[in-house]
Amino acid sequence: MELKINNANSKLIIANTEILRGTRVTINLELPKLYNTPTNLPIRVLRGKKDGPIVFVSAAIHGDELNGIEIIRRLRKLSILNKLKGTLILVPIVNVYGIMNLSRYLPDRRDLNRSFPGSIKGSLASRVAKTFFDEVVLRCDLGIDLHTASIHKSNLPQVRTNIDNEYTFKLAKAFGAPVVLHSELRDGSLRGTAQDSGVPILLYEAGEALRFDETSIRIGVTGIINVLREIQMLPAVLKKKTIKSPIITRNSNWIRSSESGMLRTIKALGDIVKKDEIIAFIDEPLGDDIYEIRATFDGVIIGKSEIPLVQEGDAIFHIAKLKNLESAESKLEYFNDSAMDESEFHELNNEEIIE
């Protein structure tokens, strides 16, 4: 299955602004006012001189997920985009209301990523979703949506997609994150609603809310370039190096706290764990009891809690199920080492490393 391009040879008009071939334009999409303050959704449109697919890259649908904003900032600096075939639409901050309050949600406490396709007569979240979906998503042939874990949790860099879809699975592997995780579509989500409208989306999950993570950012920038190359929007790399395939997993589960207390984790993101292996302890602040948390199956830790205070039932570790642990460990070592290697792009090598 290949990308079906619906928009290559037509005029591209967003918010009554025509984007001509070979131009770069910043457009402010009008959103509902924040009380009496005018509010806009800024997007950057890069249209190549030659026809090709239209792809959007979005970040901060949840207002506390910041890695994607930095990924897009670094991405748009790359001179290779001068060779773009087609159109790239960059939306670094979708939830402009949430980011002003460092909040995952909008002021109406709704989750924007459960509000698609939206309605001009609906809630604030629904109206924002409607504007973004109609003006950006429906004009595109493909989307890449950038996320982090929710507050007080962190994610190993991973691409989530339907691995039964031949095309998106191919792109997910090309992205080059350590893990590709099968993920079902959810009602009201951007990915689910876009798929129903014929626009496939890759979901990149990496890092922690309200924090920058250098490794997650680097893998994200390189991954987007890899996908654009895979669909022939950018020229292929001249000197190809051997690239290991990511860990592919269909199933994952959260390990939850059996008790309330203080959490001591002894396993980190990316660690391989075996069934019944101890991965954390829970202590009573004023007692002597110590409770063990064990892995319930063989796998790799792709998400974990970053706060040491837990209540019974809290999600502590997100573990992706694996069969071949030895192969997975080798792949993780490769991705960890290569993520911080010198980039083929001098603009990225000149970036200061975020600690």
Image: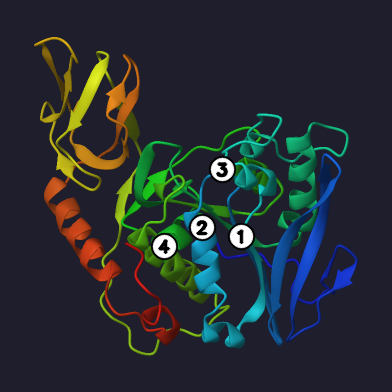
Q: According to the image, label 4 marks what residue?
A: 217
Residue 311 image point, x, y percent: 33, 16
Which numbered disc, 1 or 3, marks the residue closer to the eye?
3
In the displayed structure, 42 sits above or below 109; it is: below
Residue drawn at point x = 17 percent, y = 39 percent = 267
Dot 2 amino acid type: Gly
Residue 32 image point, x, y percent: 83, 44
Q: According to the image, label 3 marks what residue?
A: 102
Whole-angstrom CA distance, mark 4 to mark 1, is 13 Å
Q: According to the image, label 2 marks what residue?
A: 68
**Residue furthest out toward the bottom:** 238
Dot 1 amino acid type: Pro
Residue 132 image point, x, y percent: 74, 51
In the displayed structure, 13 sits above or below 86; it is: above
Report the front residue among 84 and 324: 84
Determine the image quadrant of residue 36: top right
Report the front residue among 346 and 250: 346
